[in-house]
Image (cartoon, rainbow, N blue to C red):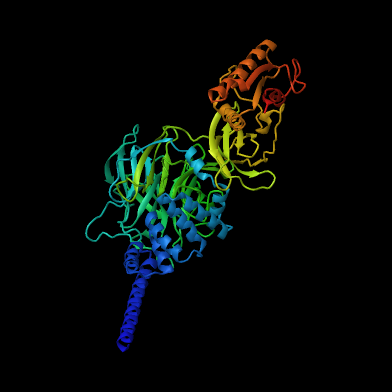
Amino acid sequence: MKNYTLIVIIMIITFSFSGYGQQAKVNSGDKKYNNYAYVDAIKTYEKVAEKGFKSEEMFKKLGNSYYFNSDFERAAKWYGELFAMNASIEPEYYYRYAQSLKSTGDINKANKLLNEFNEKSKNDHRGKLYKEDVNYLDQIKANSGRYKIEDAGVNSKYSDYGAFVYKDKLYFASARDTGNFSQRKHKWTGEYFTNIYNADLDPESGSATKVNKFRSAINTKFHEASPVFTKDGKTVYFTRNNYINGKKGKNAEKTTLIKIYRASLDTNNKWTNIQELPFNSDNYSVGHPALSPDEKTLYFASDMPGSIGQSDLYKVSINNNDGFGTPENLGTVINTEGKETFPFVTNENEIYFASDGHPGLGGLDVFVANIDDNGTISNIQNVGADVNSPKDDFAYSIDPVSRRGYFSSNKDGGQGSDDIYKFLETRRLKCTQILYGVITDAETGVILPDTRVTLFDSDMSLKKTTISDSSGNYSFAVECGKTYSVRAEKADYNTKELRVTIDKTNGKTNLPIGLDKSICKVTVGDDLGKCFAIKMIYFDLDKSNIRTEAALDLEKILDVLNNYPTMKLDIRSHTDSRATHQYNDALSDRRAKSTIQWLVKNGVAANRLSGKGYGERQLVNRCSDGVQCTEEEHQANRRSEFIITAL
């Protein structure tokens, strides 16, 4: 017994020392993390985690270290460990975990977390945007398939990003300059600092060759990126670490942030007079400049005081004396609590930007919005899955004439951590909307999942069919300004069909549908079609063959006939009063017979069916020849009847 007690004491002491040792390593990792040395922090934290040590704070920082370096798959792993320990944590982690899960392809779990994020952070724009657009994937799908994308031809195994075209040269940032023994790496990413490079460019194909380092005083031993030149080539704006005249600036936490600088081209073709812009600060970042087409406004990203999120988009006027106005936040329509960055403005009053706050595929996605005449932002759309991916996609630029351009991404299949891709936009972005709604029981309000929902155009041509999800939701991507019909069908409910006209601007149209319980008990002489709200069997104009959507209705009649083997039907086809009596008689008779033929072909005995076309001889309203009526009134006369003659 004494020996057993001694062994237990030794084990307790051993585990205690082990625990203290692991905690000491965690503390070491925390110091690296707090100094933004995320790559080094990861190495320390993961060694501790491999020993079985678990800590909510460590898992948060480990997940964050990967998240801030856009390694979302590994971030998802450690956020998963965090949530396994405690699901009641700060709302921001719900958002980061959701974004990370999108990168792994687990969209359903990501959307579930976004719902929880919205509940826990009621005032966060990102949650509201998701809740208002739960069918955002339909919008992305509708906007996809519009690009031909290729490697830009300038990529290395290091980070390459932020392309800008000027005078048949492609300018971009790259971390490929490993330099000599003393060349330093950035602690955040573990990569070398970036400099600006350029490459010769074929203006027709967009292909780049002969990559050269931009030989000028603009490049230093710290980060330079995102150059944008004025049209005359005499001024360049660019992003750089807080570094000028050989000195590195730091904020109160002793961190070197980024600023926008401006340089001028002198008569000897050298870049001189390098100055930081007056609204820079040591205490916040300002970067990624973009010029308006008239070069009177500079757009940029910043987390300056007054920002909504981690970085917002701003604009500032450029005065005639080369001074600047007061920076203006672009507002809550475009900016979220997340990151909005890398703006690019075209002469078509469009602004492209990258965001992880608007609903997307994961990481940063590229979006486009309109800049209205009064300067406000509207109609934000995801550009689609060709450009966007579950990883970071950003720094989009396009020539509005040739529709050629570039974007940067760390998507799978690239050569380095970030790569530059060239593209040709083969189809312009259409004005689209999401038509959506919830299917419910009209009386009780109970949601009705697994309801068949069919979309028809204004001519009743079948466009799409879907099934409502477990929450009764359905959605379709539709074109602006067009009229559609939506039909909802579910067993034990009457079929319902609604007509809707879509607005002429991008957005969403809500069309909830309440279905009535089917309580129809038929007898001889009743119209079986009324039980299923079948107004007519649709045919193409002047034709009598059964269309696809008509077959959907006939399948309901077929099902009843199969369940009641002694039932007999008289099928009657009617038209409106337009066209001649003789024409309408003949056309309606052919349609009645075509309906019978379809049922016989699908197994109904011919002796159970009869039918005739009545043309315009049995109108249900006043709309006879010569009487002016609305289209809806004429429609009431164009009907199909299925009269029960025997049971």
- Residue located farthest toward the right when viewing the structure as drawn: 622
Q: Percent position (x, y) of residue 611?
A: 65, 19
In this view, 468 is above or below 76: above
Q: Could you tell me if residue 78 is visible in this image?
A: yes
Closer to the camera in the image, 77 or 513: 513
Q: Identify the residue at horizontal 35%, vertical 44% (top origin).
A: 420
Q: Give the mark count.
A: 0
Residue 563 lies left or right of residue 104; in this view the side is right
Q: Residue 434's quadrant in the figure?
A: top right
Q: Percent position (x, y) of residue 173?
A: 34, 49
Looking at the rendering, in which quadrant would you find the C terminus? top right
- Residue located farthest toward the bottom when viewing the structure as drawn: 2
Q: Could you tell me if residue 343 is visible in this image?
A: no
Q: Percent position (x, y) of residue 588?
A: 64, 17
Closer to the camera in the image, 211 or 515: 515
Looking at the rendering, in which quadrant would you find the N terminus? bottom left
Residue 461 lies left or right of residue 211; in this view the side is right
Q: Percent position (x, y) of residue 319?
A: 51, 47
- Residue located farthest toward the top when viewing the structure as drawn: 582
Closer to the camera in the image, 532 or 39: 532
In this view, 444 is above or below 32: above
- Residue located farthest toward the left when viewing the structure as drawn: 181
Residue 417 lies left or right of residue 398; in this view the side is left
Q: Residue 639's quadrant in the figure?
A: top right
